[in-house]
Image (cartoon, rainbow, N blue to C red):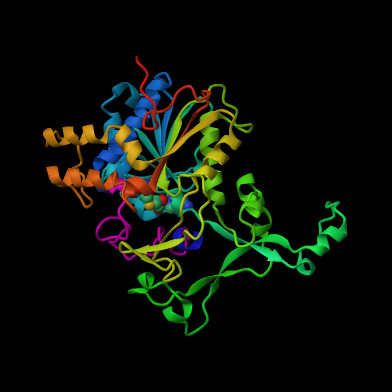
Amino acid sequence: MRMCLTADIGGYYTGALEEGRDQFGVKGDFVTSPEISQVFGELCGIWFVAEWIAQGRQSRGVELIEVGPGRGTLMDDMLRTIQRFPAMANSIDAIYMVEASPELRMAQKNLLCGENAPMTESKVGYHSVCKYNALPIVWTETIKSIPITAEKMPFIMAHEFFDALPIHAFQLVSVPATQARPPSPSDTSSPSTKTSHPTLEWREMVVSPTPPGSTHASLNTPASQSRDTPPPDFQLTLSPTSTRHSLYLPESSPRYRALKTTVGAGALLEICPDLSLYAADFAARIGGSPQHPKRKPSGAALILDYGPGDGSIPTNSLRGIRRHRRVSPFAEPGLTDLSADVDFAALAEAATRASDGVEVHGPVSQADFLEMMGIRERVETLITKDGDSVGNGGGEDGKKKLKKEDVERAMSRLVDRGPGGMGKVYKALAILPENEGRRRPVGFGGDVPAA
Ligand code: SAH
C-alpha cells in the first residue's frame, strides 16, 4: 500500500498519474468534502477559532499544521475564515503542510501563495510565503520533520489522510498442537498443556502475485470491481506461518487481544501502525510527552475520515478507487487510489497513551459535526448574501458564481445521513488538552465559552 501510494519510483500520489491529471474532482478519481463546498473548510476554520478562544486567545506561537492537504483547498478556506478574526490571524507564526506528493505540493503553493511566488528548499523542506498575512509556509514529507516546541500552540487538521496510510491485515487461525510455535524460553507453563490443545495464532494476509494467465473469473473478482480494469496482478493470501508483524501487532492492544476470546478462529483484524505514530505525534505536540515535556498543554487536532465510529475494528476494508468507482485494489498498482477504513478507537488509544496531557472527543458523524458547527446557518447566509465575495465560489473545478441550488445540493451531500451518505460514513474526532472532560469542544456537543 505504501509502495503503491507514495513510492518514489512513481506511486499514485508521487507521479504515476499522467501529466495534467490529478486525483480530485469530476475528471479525477474521487471528490473530497473541501472540493464539494467551501463551507466545509470554513467550518473547520471556525472550529479552530473556537478552540483558540476557549484556550485563552494566545497572542503568538500558534501553528497551523495540515497533513495530506490535497489541492490546498481546505487550508485556503480555513485561512480565509481565520482572517475574519484578526487577533487569531495575528497569533499564527507559521503554517506547516505535510505532503508526500511533489505535484500536490506545487498545487498547494500556487493556491496559497500564488503561481509566481518562489519556493525555496532547505534541510527541513520547502518554503514559500502565504498570500494571507504573508505567513511562512513550510512543506515537509512527514510530520517528524516539523520541530516540536513546548511553547507552541499547534492546530492540526487531518482530512482524508489516515485512510491512505498502509494497513496490515490478520486472521486468527487454529493451529494443531503439533505445529504450534514452540514456547519461548520465558514461557514457564508446563509442556503438557501446550501440546494437548490446538492454539490460536495470528496469521498475516500477504500480497502475492497472481498466477500467470489469471482472469477476473479465476480470481473471483467481484463483478462490480472488474469493469474496465485488467485482471489484478496481485492477490491477498494468508501466510502459512507467522510473520514479523503477526507476532507483535495483534498483541499490541487489549482491543485486538480480546478477539481471541470474543470471536476465536477466523477473527479478522486490520491494523495501521502509521495511524498510531501520527496520533501519538499529534498528542505529544498538544499535551507534551516524556520526550517533549510541555508545561501547559495547548492546541487541538481535528481529524475527519471514514471508518466505523462505534469502536469496532476495521476488517476487509482495503479498496481501490478509480474514476469514482470501486475497483480491485490489486489492479494496475500506482494508477489506482487505495484506502482503508480508519480505526478511530485506535487513534484515541494511541493519542491518550502517548500523552497524559490530552483527551479525545468523538467520533461523531460528519453530519452531526457540521450541523452543530452551523452548516445550515452558514449556507443560508451564503445564499442570501450571494456574491458576498467571501467565497471561492465552491464547486469542484474552479471558480463559479454561487448558485442557490448548487450551494444547497453541496450541503445536502456533506450531511447526507442515508446509507453510504457522506454525513454518515465520515466521522470527526478531536484531540484536545486534558481538562478532565469539563469542556467539550464545539461540534462535539460543546459551546463557545462566554467572553
Ligand atoms: N485532505 C485533502 C486530500 C485528501 S487525499 C482533501 O480532503 O481534499 C490524501 C492526501 O494525503 C494527498 O494530499 C496525498 O498526497 C497525501 N498523502 C497520502 N499519503 C501520504 C503520506 N504517507 N505522507 C504524506 N502525505 C500523504
Name the residue rendered at 39%, 24% in the picture: 52
* Near-viewer residue (418 or 104): 418
> Is residue 177 placed above or below 64 in the rendered structure?
below
Residue 363: percent from left, percent from top:
44, 39
Name the residue rendered at 40%, 58% in the picture: 13
Residue 69 visible: no
* Near-viewer residue (4 or 318): 318
* Near-viewer residue (317 or 7): 317
Residue 329: percent from left, percent from top:
44, 66
Placement of the C terminus among the 4 image quadrants: top left
Q: Quadrant of residue 135?
A: top left
Residue 384: percent from left, percent from top:
12, 33
Residue 33: percent from left, percent from top:
30, 47
In this view, the residue farthest toward the bottom is: 213
Residue 439 visible: yes
User: What range is drawn magenta here?
Assistant: 6-35
Query: Is 144 situated left or right of 393 in this image?
Result: right
Q: Is residue 28 magenta?
A: yes
> Is residue 128 placed above or below 342 in the rendered structure?
above
Query: Is 162 situated left or right of 198 in this image?
Result: left
